[in-house]
Amino acid sequence: MEGMIKDGRLRCINDNDLMKVHMLDAALKFEEGTNRRRLIKMSAKQHIDGMAALADAICMRHNYYEELQTQLSNER
């Protein structure tokens, strides 16, 4: 996802200040034994809902792209 943002393939964040705040409030926590990564808040009062929704959408796109590519093509 980070690569998609840096490459300019994901442009939904440019003018969305709320999304920027949610991205800045989020961090990844690595679990040693399982090699899992979890999205966590930097502090208890911050919000990461937008970041979590974006991560879910990117994962779904990645997992089901072959099946849904015509619906995801974003062409008119």
Image (cartoon, rainbow, N blue to C red):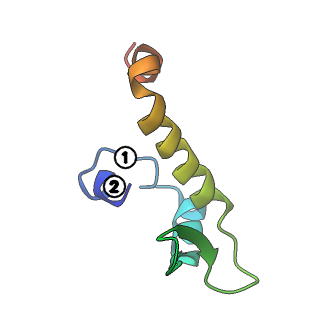
Alpha carbons under labels 2 and 1: distance apart: 5 Å
Q: What residue appears at the point 56 percent right and 60 percent down from the top-left corner?
A: 19
Which of disc 1 and disc 2 is earlier in sequence? Answer: 2
Quadrant of the image occupied by residue 45: bottom right
One can see residue 42 in this view: yes
Q: Which residue is mark 1?
A: 10
Q: Quarter of the image for the C terminus: give it.
A: top left
Q: Position of residue 26 (x, y in %)?
A: 56, 74
One can see residue 74 in this view: no
Q: What residue appears at the point 61 percent right and 58 percent down from the top-left corner?
A: 52
**Callout 1: few (<14), some (14-19), or many (20+) C-alpha neighbours within 10 Å?**
some
Residue 6, placed above or below residue 66 = below
Quadrant of the image occupied by residue 49: bottom right
In-front residue for pair 24/2: 2
In terms of secondary structure, where does tag 1 sit?
A: loop
Residue 42, placed above or below residue 76 = below
